[in-house]
Image (spheres, grey):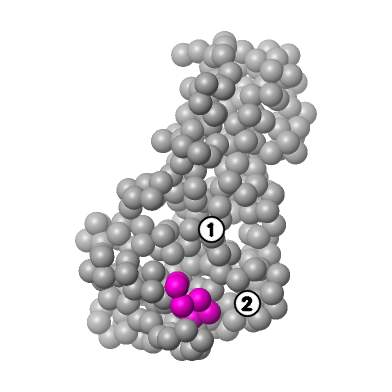
Amino acid sequence: MFSFFRKNNAPKKRKYFTKDELEDALLEADVEYELVEVILEQTYQKKITREILRSKLLATLAYTSYQEPEFAPPFVELIVGVNGAGKTTTISKLAAKYKEEGKSVLLGAGDTFRAAAIEQLTLWAKKLDIPIVSSKQGHDSSAVTYDAIDSAKAKGIEHVIIDTAGRLHTQTNLSNELRKIHRICEKAHNGAPHRTVLVIDGTQGNSAIAQAKAFNEMIGIDGIIITKLDGTAKGGSVFSIAYALELPILYVGTGELPQDLQKFDKYEFVDTLLDALFEL
């Protein structure tokens, strides 16, 4: 499922690690240095076994569980994130997942800032054979959001996924726009958005963490989806992101195909790393 080490550069499997050996191994797996230091400082044993490290790694993922709120259909999801994080592709994967589960889905092309975003999402809607509410570039994204939710309610659709602009999180106009969209969701449907999801690029390290903190301050994030954890990336960044943000990890993206969006299981994730480090 995950690739923690570069090809031909994985550490030799051991029954235990010293602190120095473990530090090197965790850094190579792309765990941020600051978190590696925290793990080592909280580990008092000279010989660190699989069981000891497992408890430490699981502790860094303590906030990754998520409980879906109660809601009256449709379930409205607001998807946010900067350009290049894989937001549009992730939306298509979510839509495909819901459709495979037998649920009805509607997309809202709320990123009216970028024409390519509207076109890309429209192509995905056609490919998945699901409805989409869109407008032209430059039109009011809040109006698109309202119309998408209103259309879903009228048609009895169960899930609404709203795309949003992915301009740099430091821009004031994006902050104001997202807050407005958030308010419009509530106006269109009581309790909406039921889930605000941040899509972040797992290869970006501290940059992704800074983005997430900024978006969380803007509108409040309910969960994150980490993308680009395929064979070219090392999955250890997930530990750093989860530890720094204290937010649930909903899914991880490990490729381009719909089935490559996988529900995050912290036990499976930790055990995959441990399997690469320790003798069975």
- Image marks 2 and 1: residues in contact by CB distance under 8 Å: no
Quarter location, residue 236: top right
Specify whether 209 is left or right of 114: right
Question: Looking at the rendering, in which quadrant would you find the N terminus?
Answer: top left
Quarter location, residue 57: top right
Quarter location, residue 134: bottom left
Label 2 CA crowd tier, 10 Å (few <14, some 14–19, many 20+)? some
Specify whether 87 is left or right of 159: right
- The numbered disc on residue 85 is 1
Residue type pointed to by label 1: Ala
Q: Residue at x 52, y 21 (%)?
A: 8
Check disc 1 and report its element: helix, strand or loop. Answer: loop
Residue 180: horizontal and vertical position, in percent? 57, 83
Q: Camera-side residue: 75 or 253?
A: 253
Task: Examine the rendering and report whether any part of residue 166 can be seen.
Answer: yes
Q: Residue at x 53, y 79 (%)?
A: 113
Say if 43 sits above or below 193 in the image.
Answer: above
Provide the residue span drawn in magenta.
112-117
Magenta residue check for 113: yes
Magenta residue check for 179: no
Task: Examine the rendering and report whether any part of residue 76 can be seen.
Answer: no
> Residue at the top extreme?
15
Label 1 CA crowd tier, 10 Å (few <14, some 14–19, many 20+)? many
Residue linked to disc 2: 174
